[in-house]
Amino acid sequence: MAVFESDTTLNASAEQVFEFLIQPPNLRQIAHPDMGLKFLDAPEKLQLGDEFQFMVQTLGQVQKIRHRITVFDSPTLFVEELIEGPLPKWVHSHSFVQVDDGQTLVRDTVEFEPPGGLLGLLLTESRIQDHLEDGFHHRHQQLQKLFATA
């Protein structure tokens, strides 16, 4: 299984960052515009066991995806797992570590398995890694801007 990891440090408490990221409307605010993120069915705030459905654009194709929250430990960790979508496996862990000086280290870890068959020729591990790198770079830049004024 492939693993992608990306970190950023924000000028906010773990509680503030965690609270922001468990609200699906806020995720649209920090998503890369090319992603076309649109929530079809999502709670106002995520909690353990919640399922949410959304659409994203990947490689020119609109994909309908459903995730479930499988771990929820406020304010240090929540994990979302793919239950419907184009990949056989996708587990996204969001962890939050309070740093001594009032900052929070935000770590996104994505474990995934690229698809097989013809789709696997397009969605290779390398291509997925590059897509994640671009998306999380944008996401972390947006978080830096939002929490710079918090």
Image: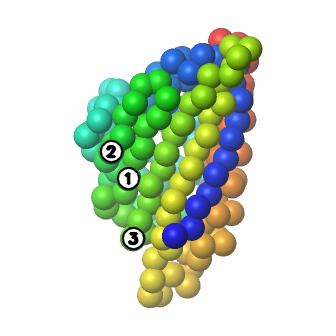
Residue furthest to the front: 100
Q: Is residue 105 left or right of residue 36?
A: right
Q: Is residue 57 above or below residue 116?
A: above
Q: Is residue 140 left or right of residue 55?
A: right
CA gap between label 3 and label 2 equals 17 Å
Q: Are marks 3 and 2 in contact (CB under 8 Å)?
A: no
Q: Amino acid at mark 3?
A: Pro
Residue denoted by label 2: 70
User: 127 and 34: which one is in front?
Assistant: 127
Residue 67 screen position, x and y as percent:
34, 50
Number of numbered callouts drawn: 3
Q: Is residue 60 left or right of residue 83?
A: right
Residue 110 screen position, x and y as percent:
54, 54
Residue denoted by label 3: 88
Q: Amino acid at mark 2?
A: Thr
Residue 24 screen position, x and y as percent:
42, 33
Q: Secondary structure at mark 1?
A: strand
Residue denoted by label 1: 81
